Image (tube, grey):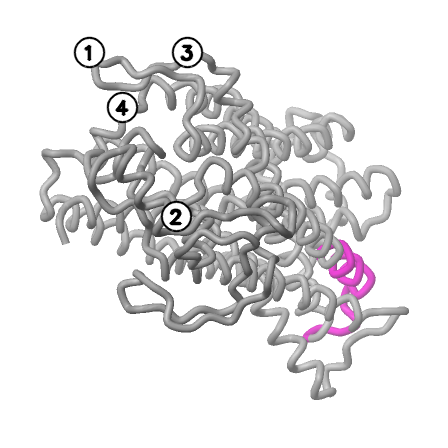
Amino acid sequence: MDATDLARWQFGITTVYHFLFVPITIGLSFLVAGFQTAWSRTGDEKWLKLTKFYGKLLLINFAMGVVTGLVQEFQFGMNWSGYSRFVGDIFGAPLAMEALLAFFLESTFLGLWIFGWDRLPKRIHLACIWIVAVGTVLSASFILAANSWMQNPVGFRINPERGRAELTDFGAVLTNKVALITIPHTVAGAFLTAGALVAAVAMWHLVRRPGRDTGAFRSAVKLGSWTTLVAMAALLITGDVQGKIMTEVQPMKMAAAEALYTTEQPAPFSLFTIGTLDGSRPVWSLDVPRVLSFLATGTFDGRVQGVNDLQAEYAARFGPGNYAPNIPVTYWSFRLMIGFGVLAALFALWALWAIRKGRSPAPERRGTRFLMWAMITLPLMPLAANSFGWIFTEMGRQPWIVFGQMKTAVAASPAASSGDVITSLIVYTVLYGVLAVVEVGLLLHYARAGLPDVTPPPPAESDEDRPLAFAY
C-alpha cells in the first residue's frame, strides 16, 4: 500500500476507535442528568445512587474520549496537508466553535459537577450536569456540520489562485440539509448506545446479585431499555429521511449501498446480494420489489439511478476515473449498521419482558443464563452499529474526500512517506490497544462494584475544614 492508503487506514482506525466513546458520553450524560433530576424532585435515595454509579462510568468514558479525540487534530496536519489547505477556511469556523463554546461548556461544568457535591446549591449542581449534556450535543453538532460539508459542500467558493475553498456563508454550512438530519440521527444513535449500557449493567446486577439494590436496578433496566427502544424508533425515522437526502446529494452512495448497478424504476430493495470479488457486477440477488424506490424517493414507483449509469455521468462531468466506492464494503456496512441496531432493540425488549409485573430473573433458570449473556453483549450492539454507520458514510463517499470538489488521492500529505505513516499507525494502534485495556478494565471494575454508599458524611466544623475532594 502507498502512503495514501496507509493514511486512510490510520484515519479509519483512529476515528472509529474515538467514536466508540462519543455516543456513550452524549447519551449517558443525559441519562445521568435524568437520574439526578429524579433524585432532586423525589428525594428517593435510589436515584442518587444511580446518579453516582453511572456518573462514574460517564467520567471514565469522557476522559478516554478526550484523549483519543486529540489524535484526530494531529492527523489532519500530518497525513492530510492537501486536505487541510483546501478546507481550512471552511472547517476553521465550526471546529473553533466546537472547542471554544461546546467543549468549554462540557469541561468547565463537568468539573463543577464533579467537585460541587454538597458545595453548590442543589439546583445549581443539577444544572451543571444538564449543561454538560447540552454541551455534548453542541460539540457533536459543530463537528457533524463540518463532516456534512464534506458530503454536500455548500456556502463556499473556490479561489482559483490559491486552489482552496473559501467560506462565503457560515449559516449555510450550519443549516446544510445533510447536517440537519445527520445530527438527530447521530444523537439518536448515542441514546441507543447509552440506554443499552445502562440496561445491561443493571440487568447483570439483578441476575448476579438478586436482592441487592433491586429496586434501583429495576428502575435502571426500565429506563435503559425504554431509551434504547425509543432511540431505535428515532433512528428509523431519521434514517429514512437521511436516505432520501443521500439519494438527492450522493446518488452513487445509495446505489452502492443497494448494489444497484443499472437504473431501475421501480427499484427493488436487496435483502442479500452475491457479487463478483471486485464488486463490479452482481451474480445473484434476493430482492423485495419497489421498496428501494420508496426508501430513496418516497414513492413506490420512484426512479433510482444505478452504479453504471452514474459512473458514466460522473466520468463525463469530472473526467476519466472510477467514481464508484468499494461496493462490497458499502453494501454490507449498511446492512450491519441496521442489523446491530435492530438486535439491540430486540435485546432491550427481552429485558423489559424479563422484569415485567414485578418479576425478577431467577439465576437458576436456564433462560436467565441466556438473558445474562445477551445483556453482556447488548452494549456492543449499538457500538457496532455506530461504527458500521460511519464506515458506510465515509467509504460510500469515495473516491471523494469532499464530494465533487476534491478526491482523496490528492488530499494526502506529499511529504509523508509510507514509512512515516506506517510508523505512526503502529504507534497509535499499540497506544489505543493499551488504552482499550485500561478503559475496559476501569469500566468493568466500577460496574461490578455496585451502587455506592450515599450516606452523608458527618458535618464539618466550617467550610474551611472541608477540602476540595473528588466526589467519587
Q: Amino acid at mark 2?
A: Gly
| Residue beneath disc 4 | 86
Which is more N-terminal, label 2 or label 4? Answer: 4
Q: Are marks 2 and 3 in contact (CB under 8 Å)?
A: no
Q: Amino acid at mark 3?
A: Thr
Determine the CA span between mark 4 and mark 1. Answer: 12 Å
Residue drawn at (70%, 64%) of the image: 348
Q: Amino acid at mark 1?
A: Glu
Determine the CA span between mark 3 and mark 1. Answer: 16 Å
Q: Quadrant of residue 409?
A: top left
415 to 14, vertically: above or below: above
Tag 1, which secondary structure?
Answer: loop
Instruction: Tell us which disc is closer to us: 4 or 2.
Output: 2
- Main SS, magenta region, reads helix
**What's the mark number on residue 161?**
1
Q: Amino acid at mark 4?
A: Phe
Residue drawn at (73%, 87%) of the image: 364
Residue 53 visible in the snapshot: no
Tag 3, which secondary structure?
Answer: loop
105 to 234, vertically: above or below: above
Which is more N-terminal, label 1 or label 4? Answer: 4
Q: Are marks 3 and 4 in contact (CB under 8 Å)?
A: no
Tag 2, which secondary structure?
Answer: loop
| Residue beneath disc 2 | 396
Determine the CA span between mark 4 and mark 2. Answer: 21 Å
Q: Is residue 340 left or right of residue 49?
A: left
Label 2 crowd (10 A; few <14 / some 14-19 / many >=20): many
| Residue beneath disc 3 | 168
Magenta segment boundaries in residue numbering: 208-224
Q: Is residue 211 magenta?
A: yes
